[in-house]
């Protein structure tokens, strides 16, 4: 009977170790996925900031150039504002197809890989 108790205790101990190891592995995998998503987010954020600054300065230049062509600089800014107003309407109408689904799919792909 003593041998059986020792085997059962050994089995229980190994089960506990397996559970602890599995939990630790799950924690490490979660940390890895979180770090990957966060680092991708930060790197894209930096790119978006520089691209935004580039397009802002470019738009000011185009607005001033169009203003010179149209006779008053404010007309160039109105044309650029109208262009972005139309873009906002298009993106507002088609936001699920153009923005939401691709972003959701990208996040899900990163988390599941």
Image: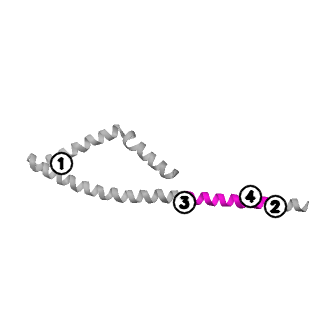
Q: What crowding class fits label 4: few (fewer than 14 Cα within 10 Å), some (14-19), or many (20 or more)?
A: few
- Mark 4 highlights which residue? 15
**Of label 3 and label 2, which has the lower sequence position?**
2
Q: Quadrant of residue 51?
A: bottom left
- Foreground: 21 or 83? 21
The quadrant holding residue 47 is bottom left
Marks 3 and 2 sit apart, C-alpha to C-alpha, by: 33 Å
| Residue at the spot of label 1 | 77
CB-based contact (under 8 Å), mark 1 and mark 2: no
33 to 70, vertically: above or below:
below
**Callout 2: few (<14), some (14-19), or many (20+) C-alpha neighbours within 10 Å?**
few
| Structure colour scheme | one colour
Describe residue 14's horizontal placement relative to residue 85 as left or right.
right
Which range is magenta?
11-31
Residue at (56% x, 58% y) in the render = 29
Mark 4 or 1, closer to the camera? 4
Q: In terms of sequence position, does the residue under pointer 1 or pointer 2 come before the other?
A: 2
Lower sequence index among marks 4 and 2:
2
Residue underneath mark 2: 9
Relative to 112, is 42 on the left or the right? left
């Amino acid at each position: 009977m003593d041998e059986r108790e020792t085997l059962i205790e050994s089995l229980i101990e190994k089960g506990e170790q397996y559970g602890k190891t599995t939990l630790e592995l799950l924690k490490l995998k979660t940390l890895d996925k979180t770090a990957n998503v966060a680092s991708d987010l930060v790197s894209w954020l930096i790119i978006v900031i520089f691209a935004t600054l580039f397009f802002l300065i470019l738009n000011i230049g185009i607005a001033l150039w169009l203003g010179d062509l149209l006779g008053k600089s404010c007309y160039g800014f109105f044309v650029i504002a109208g262009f972005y107003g139309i873009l906002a309407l298009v993106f507002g109408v088609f936001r699920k197809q153009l923005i939401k689904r691709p972003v959701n799919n990208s996040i899900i792909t990163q988390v599941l890989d």
